[in-house]
Image (cartoon, rainbow, N blue to C red):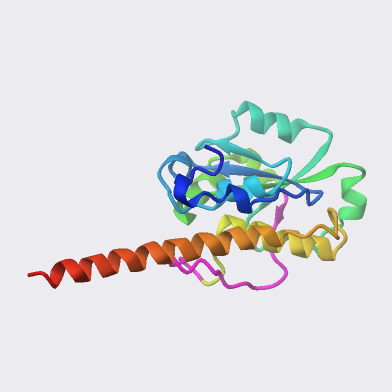
Amino acid sequence: MRCFRPKNHCYCSMIQPVDPGIKFVILMHPWEAYKQRTGTGRLTSLCLEGSEIIIDKTFDQNRRFKKLIDSPNYFPMVLYPGKEAFTAAGFDFENTLKGRRLLVFLIDATWVMARKMMYRSSVLQALPRISFERAYTSRFIIKTQPADYCLSTIESTYYLIKELQECGIGIPHVSVEGLMLVFDELNRFQMECRDHRFLENVQKKGKF
């Protein structure tokens, strides 16, 4: 019940949570939470100490979301692409954080759903956006991404942490390679299942 994986392929033994010095909150669409079997949002949260998942379609009236936004302990940003998005190197964290912990909201949904979740929330729209300095290609080989720049939640989190660490944000010496180790295992297992189903179908057809 921790990683929501079948008992014969549980990821929990692989997961060693780390604290990157940044709080991540995953805003997860209900479909992603309850219907998507290969989603990476839950795995992302399990890998990061202090992270949270908030499941909803809209968030402006969500009590936990509002509490985090209003907390004097955090400086909230949302990971979302766009011309107005800052990069880790292009934002003045030193003069902005002022003792507060960086809080990054991640929208975990399909791209169509994510756009709707973003633009249904005036609070999310008002937050400063952060995106990547460099271009990355997804390693999510079991899924076709809608565009070259599209990444899974776990990949997005990994690359963002790495870029923030390069700028001295968070805890620079903390390794977050465990995120990608779990992600690669997810891909390996799903590919293995796909190949097994293909072989079964070929064998069944060969009987006729």
- Residue 143 lies in the magenta-colored region: yes
Specify whether residue 86 is in view: no
Residue 184, horizontal then vertical, whole percent: 56, 64
Please provide the residue range marked out in magenta: 128-147
Residue 17, horizontal then vertical, whole percent: 71, 48
Closest to the observer: 54 or 50?
A: 50
Closest to the observer: 99 or 159?
A: 159
- Residue at 45%, 49% in the rendered image: 8
Residue 124, horizontal then vertical, whole percent: 64, 43
Magenta stretch secondary structure, dominant: loop
The image quadrant where one finds the C terminus is bottom left
- Residue 88 lies in the magenta-colored region: no
- Relative vertical location of residue 148 with respect to residue 95 in this rendering, above or below: below
- Relative vertical location of residue 172 with respect to residue 3 in this rendering, above or below: below
Asked if residue 116 lies left or right of residue 204, the reply is right
- Residue at 60%, 29% in the rendered image: 62
Closest to the observer: 9 or 22?
A: 9
- Relative vertical location of residue 159 with respect to residue 148 in this rendering, above or below: above
